[in-house]
Image (cartoon, grey):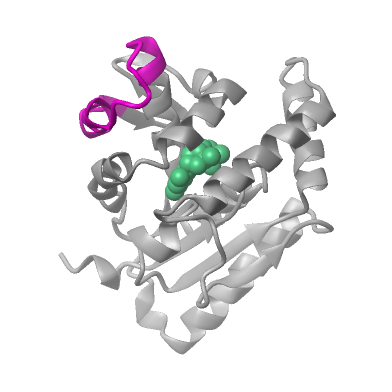
Amino acid sequence: MDTYKIPVITIDGPSASGKGTVAQLVAKKLGFHYLDSGSLYRLVALKTMQTHTDIHNTEQLAEIARNLDVVFKNEDIYLDGSIVTDAIRAEQCGSLASQLAAHPQVREALTERQRAFCQPPGLVTDGRDMGSVIFPEAILKIFLTASAEVRAQRRYKQLIEKGIDANIADLLQDIQKRDERDSNRSIAPLRQDADAKLLDTTSLTISQAQDAVLSWYNEIHAINPRLNMK
Ligand code: DC
Protein backbone atom coordinates (compact mmCIF):
# COMPACT_ATOMS: atom_id res chain seq x y z
CA MET A 1 0.00 0.00 0.00
CA ASP A 2 1.32 3.46 -0.84
CA THR A 3 0.85 5.12 2.54
CA TYR A 4 1.43 8.60 1.13
CA LYS A 5 -1.87 8.50 -0.75
CA ILE A 6 -3.49 8.52 2.67
CA PRO A 7 -3.96 12.08 3.94
CA VAL A 8 -1.98 12.81 7.09
CA ILE A 9 -2.34 15.95 9.20
CA THR A 10 0.47 16.52 11.68
CA ILE A 11 0.11 18.83 14.67
CA ASP A 12 3.40 19.35 16.46
CA GLY A 13 4.02 21.66 19.35
CA PRO A 14 5.15 22.09 22.93
CA SER A 15 3.81 20.40 26.02
CA ALA A 16 0.32 21.41 27.26
CA SER A 17 -0.39 23.50 24.15
CA GLY A 18 -3.75 21.78 23.60
CA LYS A 19 -2.52 20.07 20.41
CA GLY A 20 -3.88 16.70 21.55
CA THR A 21 -7.37 18.05 22.14
CA VAL A 22 -7.41 19.85 18.79
CA ALA A 23 -5.97 16.82 16.94
CA GLN A 24 -8.60 14.50 18.43
CA LEU A 25 -11.45 16.84 17.52
CA VAL A 26 -10.19 17.23 13.95
CA ALA A 27 -9.76 13.45 13.59
CA LYS A 28 -13.31 12.90 14.82
CA LYS A 29 -14.74 15.54 12.49
CA LEU A 30 -12.96 14.04 9.45
CA GLY A 31 -13.49 10.41 10.51
CA PHE A 32 -9.70 9.89 10.50
CA HIS A 33 -7.54 7.77 12.79
CA TYR A 34 -5.73 9.53 15.61
CA LEU A 35 -2.25 9.00 17.03
CA ASP A 36 -1.02 10.72 20.19
CA SER A 37 2.69 10.00 19.69
CA GLY A 38 3.58 11.42 23.11
CA SER A 39 1.64 8.56 24.69
CA LEU A 40 4.19 6.11 23.24
CA TYR A 41 7.07 7.98 24.89
CA ARG A 42 5.05 8.11 28.10
CA LEU A 43 4.45 4.34 27.88
CA VAL A 44 8.18 3.73 27.52
CA ALA A 45 8.69 5.95 30.59
CA LEU A 46 6.08 4.04 32.61
CA LYS A 47 7.56 0.67 31.69
CA THR A 48 11.04 1.98 32.53
CA MET A 49 9.81 2.96 35.99
CA GLN A 50 7.94 -0.32 36.50
CA THR A 51 11.02 -2.36 35.58
CA HIS A 52 13.48 -0.09 37.44
CA THR A 53 15.53 0.18 34.26
CA ASP A 54 18.57 2.46 34.37
CA ILE A 55 17.52 5.55 32.39
CA HIS A 56 21.01 5.80 30.90
CA ASN A 57 21.02 2.26 29.54
CA THR A 58 19.99 3.19 25.99
CA GLU A 59 20.11 -0.40 24.71
CA GLN A 60 17.63 -1.56 27.32
CA LEU A 61 15.41 1.51 26.81
CA ALA A 62 15.28 0.82 23.08
CA GLU A 63 14.42 -2.79 23.85
CA ILE A 64 11.49 -1.60 26.00
CA ALA A 65 10.33 0.72 23.20
CA ARG A 66 10.56 -2.03 20.57
CA ASN A 67 8.69 -4.60 22.64
CA LEU A 68 5.97 -2.44 24.20
CA ASP A 69 2.84 -4.57 24.55
CA VAL A 70 0.33 -1.78 24.00
CA VAL A 71 -3.28 -1.71 22.87
CA PHE A 72 -5.25 1.45 22.07
CA LYS A 73 -8.92 0.63 22.51
CA ASN A 74 -11.66 3.28 22.37
CA GLU A 75 -10.41 5.99 24.72
CA ASP A 76 -8.20 3.67 26.76
CA ILE A 77 -4.56 2.59 26.59
CA TYR A 78 -3.49 -0.85 27.84
CA LEU A 79 0.10 -1.74 28.73
CA ASP A 80 0.73 -5.45 29.29
CA GLY A 81 -3.04 -5.90 29.58
CA SER A 82 -3.61 -3.23 32.26
CA ILE A 83 -5.30 0.13 31.74
CA VAL A 84 -2.70 2.92 32.07
CA THR A 85 -4.66 5.79 30.49
CA ASP A 86 -4.41 8.01 33.60
CA ALA A 87 -1.10 6.66 34.92
CA ILE A 88 0.84 7.87 31.87
CA ARG A 89 -0.57 11.41 32.28
CA ALA A 90 1.26 11.95 35.58
CA GLU A 91 3.82 14.77 35.42
CA GLN A 92 6.54 12.34 36.52
CA CYS A 93 5.83 10.20 33.46
CA GLY A 94 5.86 13.20 31.12
CA SER A 95 9.12 14.44 32.51
CA LEU A 96 10.81 11.02 32.22
CA ALA A 97 9.35 10.62 28.71
CA SER A 98 11.02 13.88 27.73
CA GLN A 99 14.39 12.59 29.02
CA LEU A 100 14.08 9.21 27.28
CA ALA A 101 12.94 10.86 24.06
CA ALA A 102 16.37 12.46 23.73
CA HIS A 103 17.91 9.02 22.99
CA PRO A 104 18.09 8.34 19.22
CA GLN A 105 17.76 4.56 19.85
CA VAL A 106 14.43 5.07 21.62
CA ARG A 107 13.10 7.30 18.82
CA GLU A 108 14.24 4.83 16.17
CA ALA A 109 12.55 1.96 18.01
CA LEU A 110 9.21 3.83 17.92
CA THR A 111 9.36 5.00 14.29
CA GLU A 112 7.67 2.07 12.53
CA ARG A 113 5.08 1.70 15.27
CA GLN A 114 4.03 5.30 14.63
CA ARG A 115 3.98 4.94 10.83
CA ALA A 116 1.70 1.90 11.16
CA PHE A 117 -1.10 4.26 12.27
CA CYS A 118 -1.25 5.69 8.75
CA GLN A 119 -4.35 3.86 7.53
CA PRO A 120 -7.29 4.85 5.30
CA PRO A 121 -9.22 7.09 5.30
CA GLY A 122 -6.58 9.30 6.97
CA LEU A 123 -4.61 10.15 10.08
CA VAL A 124 -4.35 13.10 12.43
CA THR A 125 -1.34 12.88 14.72
CA ASP A 126 0.28 15.09 17.31
CA GLY A 127 3.76 15.22 18.83
CA ARG A 128 7.07 16.96 18.33
CA ASP A 129 8.48 15.48 15.10
CA MET A 130 5.43 14.13 13.31
CA GLY A 131 5.77 16.51 10.37
CA SER A 132 9.56 16.69 10.27
CA VAL A 133 10.58 13.04 10.78
CA ILE A 134 7.74 10.50 10.99
CA PHE A 135 5.38 11.78 8.26
CA PRO A 136 7.46 14.16 6.12
CA GLU A 137 4.96 13.81 3.25
CA ALA A 138 1.97 14.90 5.34
CA ILE A 139 -0.43 17.08 3.36
CA LEU A 140 -0.93 19.52 6.21
CA LYS A 141 1.67 20.30 8.89
CA ILE A 142 0.85 22.55 11.80
CA PHE A 143 2.95 23.93 14.62
CA LEU A 144 0.49 24.59 17.43
CA THR A 145 1.68 26.63 20.36
CA ALA A 146 0.64 29.06 23.11
CA SER A 147 2.58 31.10 25.65
CA ALA A 148 4.11 29.10 28.52
CA GLU A 149 1.91 31.01 31.02
CA VAL A 150 -1.31 30.13 29.18
CA ARG A 151 -0.19 26.50 28.86
CA ALA A 152 0.50 26.34 32.61
CA GLN A 153 -2.98 27.73 33.30
CA ARG A 154 -4.60 25.19 30.95
CA ARG A 155 -2.70 22.31 32.55
CA TYR A 156 -3.67 23.63 36.02
CA LYS A 157 -7.37 23.73 35.09
CA GLN A 158 -7.17 20.22 33.63
CA LEU A 159 -5.58 18.79 36.80
CA ILE A 160 -7.96 20.58 39.18
CA GLU A 161 -10.93 19.31 37.15
CA LYS A 162 -9.57 15.79 37.61
CA GLY A 163 -9.35 16.39 41.37
CA ILE A 164 -5.52 16.44 41.28
CA ASP A 165 -3.82 19.06 43.45
CA ALA A 166 -1.57 21.43 41.45
CA ASN A 167 0.47 24.59 41.72
CA ILE A 168 0.70 27.01 38.77
CA ALA A 169 4.27 28.16 39.54
CA ASP A 170 5.51 24.53 39.63
CA LEU A 171 3.63 23.69 36.44
CA LEU A 172 5.10 26.72 34.65
CA GLN A 173 8.60 25.73 35.74
CA ASP A 174 8.04 22.14 34.57
CA ILE A 175 6.71 23.32 31.18
CA GLN A 176 9.67 25.65 30.67
CA LYS A 177 12.14 22.91 31.61
CA ARG A 178 10.46 20.45 29.25
CA ASP A 179 10.35 23.02 26.40
CA GLU A 180 14.03 23.63 26.80
CA ARG A 181 14.93 19.93 26.81
CA ASP A 182 12.62 19.09 23.88
CA SER A 183 13.87 22.08 21.85
CA ASN A 184 17.58 21.69 22.48
CA ARG A 185 18.10 17.96 22.00
CA SER A 186 20.21 17.12 18.96
CA ILE A 187 17.79 14.59 17.46
CA ALA A 188 14.31 15.60 16.21
CA PRO A 189 14.16 18.79 18.32
CA LEU A 190 10.88 20.60 18.88
CA ARG A 191 10.75 23.42 16.34
CA GLN A 192 8.49 24.90 13.68
CA ASP A 193 9.49 23.49 10.31
CA ALA A 194 9.62 25.75 7.28
CA ASP A 195 6.65 23.92 5.73
CA ALA A 196 4.50 23.94 8.88
CA LYS A 197 1.75 26.48 9.46
CA LEU A 198 1.90 28.34 12.76
CA LEU A 199 -1.20 28.18 14.95
CA ASP A 200 -0.75 30.30 18.07
CA THR A 201 -3.65 29.46 20.39
CA THR A 202 -2.71 31.85 23.21
CA SER A 203 -5.94 33.78 22.70
CA LEU A 204 -7.98 31.17 20.81
CA THR A 205 -10.63 28.79 22.12
CA ILE A 206 -10.34 25.07 21.35
CA SER A 207 -13.18 25.44 18.88
CA GLN A 208 -11.45 28.33 17.05
CA ALA A 209 -8.22 26.28 16.86
CA GLN A 210 -10.15 23.29 15.48
CA ASP A 211 -11.83 25.51 12.86
CA ALA A 212 -8.46 26.90 11.75
CA VAL A 213 -7.08 23.39 11.14
CA LEU A 214 -10.23 22.28 9.31
CA SER A 215 -10.25 25.34 7.11
CA TRP A 216 -6.60 24.73 6.09
CA TYR A 217 -7.45 21.10 5.39
CA ASN A 218 -10.51 22.10 3.33
CA GLU A 219 -8.38 24.48 1.26
CA ILE A 220 -5.96 21.64 0.43
CA HIS A 221 -8.82 19.22 -0.16
CA ALA A 222 -10.51 21.66 -2.58
CA ILE A 223 -7.34 21.69 -4.69
CA ASN A 224 -6.94 17.90 -4.59
CA PRO A 225 -10.27 16.16 -3.77
CA ARG A 226 -8.77 12.70 -4.42
CA LEU A 227 -6.85 13.03 -1.17
CA ASN A 228 -9.76 11.81 0.87
CA MET A 229 -10.25 8.13 0.13
CA LYS A 230 -13.39 7.70 2.23
O1 DC B 1 3.12 15.32 24.10
P1 DC B 1 3.49 14.80 25.48
O2 DC B 1 3.70 15.89 26.48
O3 DC B 1 2.56 13.74 25.94
O4 DC B 1 4.93 14.07 25.27
C1 DC B 1 5.70 13.61 26.36
C2 DC B 1 7.18 13.72 26.00
O5 DC B 1 7.49 12.80 24.94
C3 DC B 1 7.62 15.09 25.51
O6 DC B 1 8.12 15.90 26.54
C4 DC B 1 8.69 14.79 24.49
C5 DC B 1 8.41 13.40 24.02
N1 DC B 1 7.87 13.34 22.66
C6 DC B 1 8.78 13.36 21.63
O7 DC B 1 9.97 13.52 21.86
N2 DC B 1 8.35 13.22 20.35
C7 DC B 1 7.04 13.08 20.06
N3 DC B 1 6.65 12.93 18.81
C8 DC B 1 6.09 13.08 21.12
C9 DC B 1 6.54 13.23 22.41
Q: In the visual, does 165 lie left or right of 36?
A: right
The residue at 50%/81% (across/down) is 220
Residue 121, placed above or below residue 21: below
Observer able to see residue 76: yes
The quarter of the image holding the C terminus is bottom left
The residue at 76%/47% (across/down) is 148
Residue 121, placed above or below residue 69: below
Q: Nearer the viewer, residue 79 or 97?
A: 97
The verdict on residue 158 being magenta is no
Observer able to see residue 28: no
Q: Nearer the viewer, residue 68 or 35?
A: 68
Residue 57, placed above or below residue 52: below
The percent position of residue 117, horizontal first and vertical second, equals: 31, 49
Residue 229, placed above or below residue 109: below
The residue at 28%/49% (across/down) is 111
The percent position of residue 33, horizontal first and vertical second, equals: 40, 51
Q: In the visual, does 132 lie left or right of 200?
A: left
Which quarter of the picture shows residue 109? Answer: top left
The percent position of residue 55, horizontal first and vertical second, equals: 38, 24
The verdict on residue 52 being magenta is yes
Q: In the visual, does 28 lie left or right of 108?
A: right
The quarter of the image holding the N terminus is bottom left
The percent position of residue 193, horizontal first and vertical second, equals: 51, 70
The region drawn magenta spans: 47-70
Q: What is the residue that sits farthest to the left in this orientation? A: 1
Which quarter of the picture shows residue 186? Answer: bottom left
Which quarter of the picture shows residue 120? Answer: bottom left
Counting every numbered tag in the picture gives 0
Q: Nearer the viewer, residue 221 or 98?
A: 98
The residue at 28%/53% (across/down) is 115
Q: Nearer the viewer, residue 165 or 222?
A: 165
